[in-house]
């Protein structure tokens, strides 16, 4: 497991609590573990809000649960799940050092409202931030076997912006993007939860919005399967009171700053108009100042998205997606430092490599560009803006072709047993390798940086070792 310090660093950058970041880290490894299982990977299709975060929109709200559609209903058996999660826990510990106490697995099998079996599983994990075994955090698995898949499952990489990322490991079979969208609209109409409203409007605002007939076709098939009508705007009024009451309790901890519910509620008429008629007024594209710039969409952590003072530019990107103005502390080319309120729209990269933030200054409506290295600080305001231009800072949708998986038979492109790059080889190209030795069992650990904390590990005899801090034995270049 990565260090407490790395988790705290990501928490500082995202504006979230360390426990939320740690859970996001564990979620990524759990998805990798499901994908590595030759039994589960073929039959479990990842879906829901966490799927949006981990497979399609890296700069999205953090989520807590893992939802799967199970293609083989025989998997909804407590003994079957317990045995396979024991194997999953062993793989997870071996690959990442994450500990899932096997005596804490809980799988509640129940009949859902449609009279079919479903399962709510609870898996606990050892945490840097838990005070004892009784306070261990948990991740919920929602497993359902009576869902219709309108589109073939997609093979997608899992976003995992942490130091132990391995490209060949972090993959998962999941709902295709239009299917996730259609399922979210169905959920909004059927249960009206805050996260459904948040997700639907953010998907609607994305500048890679699918054609509305595609979403409507997926939605109509899902609603027909459930025996319910296609949601319409009038249905939403019955949910307003519960949405307002639960907006903060259910969403605030998943976001660096929670926008007002009105920001989303007031967007519903435009969304349902688009869903029914495919009509949406397009804002113009913001023009370039220099003439040789390109829209720049770095992945999370790719740019080193932090200003000189440590304020994350992910805050700006989040504010743009939620249509919130930003208070920007900036030093101009003459060395004068001042604060201004802006509407953020785009990151552009010039031919000389400079990255600029394009925005509209709210005081006078003028378009301005700001060099990211001269941004001292940035914070969200509660001031909402109606976009004058296309918001190119929103998290991007699926990039490139999506590899689809067959509904039955072997998975494409995913080996039954995933290979792992040798650790020494992975570190060799990135600088010196620091070799630490456990004083208890004498096992050695290779690290890319000076960090004496050791992952949980076993002795040569296979017993858990109590050594948690090693001593530096050697440095290889």
Image: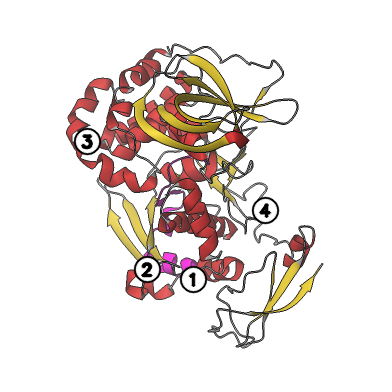
Compute the Cα span from label 3 to label 1. Answer: 38 Å
Find residue 236 and report its image quarter: top left
Q: Residue at x 52, y 55 (%)?
A: 9
Measure the C-alpha gap from mark 1 to mark 4.
22 Å
- Depth check, mark 1 against mark 4: the one in front is 1
> Which image quarter: residue 355?
top right
Which region shows up in magenta?
Answer: 57-86
Out of 362 and 105, give the one closest to the viewer.
Answer: 362
Q: Give the left or right position of residue 344, taking residue 296 as reference.
A: left
Which type of secondary structure does the marked residue at label 3 adopt? helix
Q: Can you give x and y, in whole percent of width and height, for residue 415 in the image?
A: 67, 55
Sequence-first tag of 1 and 4: 1
Residue behind mark 4: 168
**How many residues crowd around disc 2 within 10 Å: few (fewer than 14), some, or many (20 or more)?**
some
Queried whether the magenta region covers residue 60, the answer comes back as yes
Examine the rendered structure and indicate whether residue 217 appears above or below residue 81.
above
Q: Residue at x 27, y 21 (%)?
A: 233
Of tags 3 and 1, the one toward the viewer is 3
* 371 in relation to 195, above or below: above
Find the distance from the CA under tag 2 to the CA under tag 1: 11 Å
The local secondary structure at tag 1 comes to: loop
Query: In the image, is 254 to the left or to the right of 84?
Result: left
Callout 4 secondary element: loop
Query: Residue 66 bears which disc, if any?
Result: none
Q: Position of residue 32 (x, y in %)?
A: 56, 56
SS for dot 2: loop
Between discs 3 and 1, the one toward the N terminus: 1
In the image, which disc is placed on residue 99?
Answer: 1
Mark 2 or mark 1: name the one nearer the start of the chain: 1
Q: CA distance from mark 4 to mark 2?
A: 30 Å
């Amino acid at each position: 497991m990565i260090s407490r310090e790395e988790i705290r660093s990501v928490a500082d950058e995202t504006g979230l609590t360390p426990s939320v970041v740690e859970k996001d880290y564990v979620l990524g490894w759990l998805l990798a573990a499901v994908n590595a299982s030759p039994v589960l990977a073929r039959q479990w299709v990842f879906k829901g809000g966490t799927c949006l975060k981990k497979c399609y929109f890296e700069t999205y709200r953090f989520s807590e649960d893992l939802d799967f559609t199970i293609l083989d209903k025989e998997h909804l058996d407590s003994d079957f799940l317990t045995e396979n999660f024991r194997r999953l826990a062993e793989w997870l510990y071996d690959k990442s050092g994450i500990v899932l106490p096997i005596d804490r697995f809980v799988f509640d099998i129940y009949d859902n409202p449609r009279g079919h079996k479903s399962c709510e599983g609870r898996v606990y994990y050892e945490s840097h931030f838990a005070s004892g075994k009784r306070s261990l955090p948990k991740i919920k698995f929602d497993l359902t076997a009576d869902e219709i898949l309108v589109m073939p499952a997609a093979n997608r990489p899992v976003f995992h912006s942490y130091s132990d990322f391995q490209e060949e490991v972090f993959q998962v079979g999941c709902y295709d993007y239009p299917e996730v969208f259609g399922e979210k609209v169905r959920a909004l109409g059927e249960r009206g939860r805050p996260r459904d409203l948040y997700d639907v409007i953010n998907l609607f605002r994305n500048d890679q919005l699918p054609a509305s007939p595609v979403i409507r076709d997926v939605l109509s098939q899902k609603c027909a399967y459930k025996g319910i009508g296609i949601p319409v705007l009038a249905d939403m009024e019955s949910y307003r009171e519960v949405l307002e009451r639960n907006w903060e309790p259910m969403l605030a901890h998943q976001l660096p700053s929670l926008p007002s519910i009105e920001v989303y509620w007031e967007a519903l008429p435009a969304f349902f108009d688009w869903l029914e008629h495919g009509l949406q007024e397009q804002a113009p594209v913001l023009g370039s100042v220099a003439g040789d710039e390109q829209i720049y969409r770095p992945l999370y952590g790719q740019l080193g998205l932090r200003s000189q003072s440590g304020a994350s530019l992910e805050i700006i990107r989040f504010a743009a997606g939620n249509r919130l103005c930003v208070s920007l502390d900036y030093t101009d080319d003459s060395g004068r430092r001042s604060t201004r309120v802006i509407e953020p729209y785009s990151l552009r990269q010039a031919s000389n490599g400079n990255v600029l933030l394009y925005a509209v200054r709210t005081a006078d409506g003028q378009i301005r560009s700001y060099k990211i290295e001269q941004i001292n600080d940035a914070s969200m305001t509660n001031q909402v803006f109606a976009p004058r231009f296309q918001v190119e800072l929103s998290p991007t949708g699926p990039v490139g072709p999506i590899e689809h998986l067959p509904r039955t038979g072997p998975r494409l492109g995913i080996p039954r047993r995933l290979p792992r790059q040798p650790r020494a080889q992975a570190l060799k190209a990135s600088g010196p390798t620091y070799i630490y030795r456990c004083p208890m069992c004498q096992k050695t650990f290779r690290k890319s940086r000076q960090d004496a904390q050791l992952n949980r590990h076993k002795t040569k005899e296979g017993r858990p070792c109590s050594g948690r801090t090693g001593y530096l034995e050697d440095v290889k270049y």
